[in-house]
Amino acid sequence: MGFKELQFPEETVFLVTGGAGFIGSNLCEAILGKGCRVRCLDDLSTGKRKNVDLFDGNERYAFIEGDIKDLDTCRRAADGVDYVLNEAAWGSVPRSIEMPLFYERNNIMGTLNMLEASREAGVKTFVYASSSSVYGDEARLPKQEGVEGNLLSPYALTKRVNEEYAKLYTKLYGLRTVGLRYFNVFGRRQDPDGAYAAVIPKFIKMLMNGETPTINGDGRQSRDFTYVDNVIEANLRACLAPDEASGEAFNVAYGGREYLIDVYNCICDALGCPGKEPIFGPDRRGDIKHSNADISKARRLLGYDPDYSFADGIKLAIDWYKQNL
């Protein structure tokens, strides 16, 4: 079914924090496509205005430049809102290892501010981005909610703490919260640049430019790469989730498993450079070797039924980058 058939009343107001980022801007676009109202809150530290410029002039869209570390900003943004989709955060496991204090302030304090502002505003449901990194060194596959290991990075810790705060806000204050543990999301508008860019857009851009990408490790690490439209579906379904889902966190993925070297070769084939050998570099600190999600809990409680396999998504992503880079 996907997200396109999900319906909300036109007067519904959504707040998307981090709305100028990769996932956030896609959420804004999907919500506006349903005729609903959306406020985009972003401090533009990692998000980009160009991601949301196409919404300017839409009377149902409002952009607020502000920082979730500021409680008053969060309160203004949440006032009169039905649903909050909290995407604002700093990503990247290796960068968090270099900057643990920065990550604590942004990812934990910022999310706590948004939880409090949402509670005060009487928001119907607070949906927030968690991460597959909360599984840490737990080696069993597929990853299942409730079976987590030791955390491997400050980034992972911030996401685990946010889950615990959200659970408390449901238990203590009655705020409906739903956490979404994203597994390696990719798709249109994902930034290919910078030292901490995700591998798929980085591979695509470098190969399009005739450059040779570096794969950290031996390329035999595996991931449950998840196309962005599956994530949109999960967010919108979470808004309408039954009470049984409140205070819980859910895996959001396709339920597949792709080896990084195979992903690289797939992109090479699609871009007309088959057989191009990558450079192999050292493993990244804090990274897990294998990741694959059990999505049965999300299917059962959220009605989540992802439409896009990795093969479907990578074709769409490559086509987008060909047109936009």
Image (tube, rainbow, N blue to C red):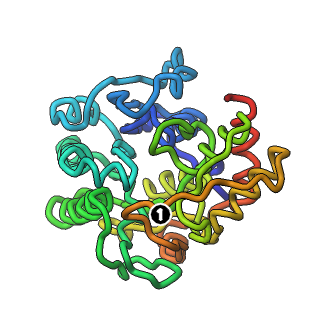
Dot 1: element: loop
* Residue 110 in sight here: no
* Residue 51 in sight here: yes
Image coordinates of residue 75 in percent, x first then y, are 20, 34
Residue closest to the far bottom: 140
Q: Residue at x 63, y 54 (%)?
A: 279
Residue closest to the far top: 57
Q: Residue at x 37, y 55 (%)?
A: 93
Between 215 and 165, the residue placed more toward the observer is: 215
Q: Residue at x 69, y 36 (%)?
A: 321
The number of callouts visible is 1
- The N terminus, quarter of image: bottom right
Left or right: 131 in relation to 315: left
Image coordinates of residue 239 in percent, x first then y, are 43, 53
Left or right: 67 in relation to 319: left
Image coordinates of residue 118 in percent, x first then y, are 24, 45
Residue type indicated by callout 1: Asp
Left or right: 282 in relation to 214: left
Left or right: 79 in relation to 22: left
- The C terminus, quarter of image: top right
Q: Is residue 132 above or below residue 128?
A: below
Q: Is residue 270 above or below residue 72?
A: below
Between 35 and 97, the residue placed more toward the observer is: 97
Image coordinates of residue 57 in percent, x first then y, are 53, 14
Between 127 and 140, the residue placed more toward the observer is: 140
Name the residue that disc number 1 marks.
283
Q: Is residue 300 above or below residue 80?
A: below
Between 73 and 46, the residue placed more toward the observer is: 46
- Quarter assignment of residue 157: bottom left
Q: Is the residue marked by circle 1 packed among few (<14), some (14-19), or many (20+) residues within 10 Å?
A: some
Q: Residue at x 40, y 23 (%)?
A: 63
